[in-house]
Image (cartoon, rainbow, N blue to C red):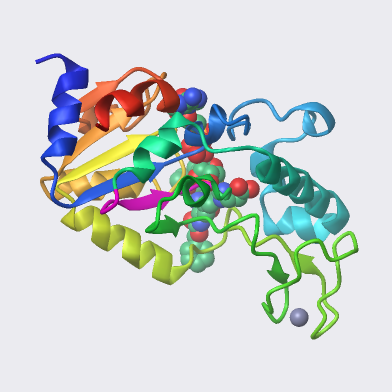
């Protein structure tokens, strides 16, 4: 059976479906992936160096400015046909590494953010949620006066325990997991599809490039999120 047909049949027959997404999911909405060279003002920076507590401590205004730029971009873009196809899977658990809200904008209800969100800035000291759009580079916390930080998980930081637990449980119970647009190099997120495979579930991958997840995938579709997902999600 041709791969697209095989993937569509596996998805249609799935009882406990999980969709695991990375930056490639948002690429066709106009959001640069982590590995795309950072554009324009940020071209000379490396995302992995900027996305750390050390970078924020060294230069809060620079790191805050980068996230404000990404938040404004995320606010302007719209879900693509891939997000809309996933939103048709009403009972699926969507586990995303992305910090945009495109799955929610497309209508997905059960979205787990492993790496936080651009839309949840919080105080770097008392963790009080901060007003989006508060003035300052970065703004000062209204409760304790300390700097506000982006609400994302940086390299070297632990993932939110509740999100990780929910994701591992969903992946362990899944009979089918679709992994879309992730390079599968960042841990522990990259474990998620591997948990499904280890527990005997079927993994379907959608990515234009080879990834380290290839060996655990029953079906790999070499294409893009917006190009492939509407063909396999009926
Ligand atoms: C932790 C939020 C410990 C921030 C992100 C050495 C070996 C192994 C591990 C480590 C190591 N040294 C350090 C580590 C741990 C580290 C890690 O894994 N490092 C990697 C680089 C080796 N992990 C951590 O630090 C994690 N924390 O381990 O904490 C701990 C434990 C307890 C207590 C204290 C501490 C935290 C990691 C989270 C970092 N934050 N994002 C922000 O957004 O700014 S990670 C970020 O990059 C993304 O969220 C994503 O997870 C990751 C990779 O990005 P992808 O989504 O995969 O995107 P990428 O650009 O890489 O690839 C795009 C893919 O899409 C490609 O495959 C491409 O082909 C495809 N594509 C392109 N276009 C399309 C497409 N697909 C479909 N359609 C298209 N159109
Ligand atoms: Zn505070």
Q: Quick one: which residue is furthest to the right in this view?
A: 136
The percent position of residue 138, horizontal first and vertical second, equals 85, 62
Q: Is residue 147 above or below residue 115?
A: below
Residue at image point 55% right, 59% down: 116
Residue at image point 87% right, 55% down: 61
The percent position of residue 71, horizontal first and vertical second, equals 71, 48
Residue at image point 19% right, 27% down: 7
The percent position of residue 122, horizontal first and vertical second, equals 69, 70
Residue at image point 15% right, 37% down: 12
Q: In which quarter of the image is the C terminus?
A: top left
> In the drawing, does residue 177 fall left or right of residue 141?
left
Quadrant of the image occupied by residue 117: bottom right
> In the drawing, does residue 222 fall left or right of residue 57?
left
Give the extent of the magenta segment: 90-98
Residue 193 visible (yes or no): yes
Residue 184 visible (yes or no): no
> In the drawing, does residue 186 fall left or right of residue 119?
left
Given residues 51 and 129, the one toward you in this image is: 129
The percent position of residue 78, horizontal first and vertical second, equals 59, 38
Quadrant of the image occupied by residue 8: top left
> In the drawing, does residue 52 fall left or right of residue 12?
right
Q: Quick one: which residue is furthest to the top in this view?
A: 2
Q: In which quarter of the image is the N terminus?
A: top left
Q: In this view, does 203 lie above or below 117?
A: above
């Amino acid at each position: 059976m041709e791969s697209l047909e095989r993937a569509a049949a596996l998805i249609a027959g799935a009882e406990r479906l999980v969709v695991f997404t990375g930056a490639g999911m948002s690429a066709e909405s106009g959001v640069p992936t982590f590995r795309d060279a950072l554009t324009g003002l940020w071209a000379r920076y490396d995302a992995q160096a900027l996305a750390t507590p050390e970078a924020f401590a060294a230069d809060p205004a620079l790191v805050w400015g980068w996230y404000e730029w990404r938040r404004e971009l995320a606010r302007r873009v719209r879900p693509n046909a891939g997000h809309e196809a996933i939103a048709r899977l009403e009972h699926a658990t969507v586990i995303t590494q992305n910090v945009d809200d495109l799955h929610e904008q497309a209508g997905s209800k059960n979205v787990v953010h492993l790496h936080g969100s651009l839309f949840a800035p919080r105080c770097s000291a008392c963790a009080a949620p901060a007003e989006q759009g508060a003035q300052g580079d970065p703004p000062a916390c209204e409760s304790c006066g300390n700097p506000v930080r982006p609400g994302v998980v940086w390299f070297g930081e632990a993932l939110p325990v509740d999100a990780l637990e929910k994701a591992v449980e969903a992946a362990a119970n899944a009979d089918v997991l679709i992994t879309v647009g992730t390079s599968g190099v960042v841990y522990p997120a990259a474990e998620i599809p591997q948990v499904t495979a280890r527990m005997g579930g079927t993994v379907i991958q959608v990515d234009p490039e080879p990834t380290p997840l290839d060996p655990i995938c029953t079906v790999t579709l070499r294409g893009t999120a917006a190009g492939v997902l509407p063909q396999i999600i009926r």
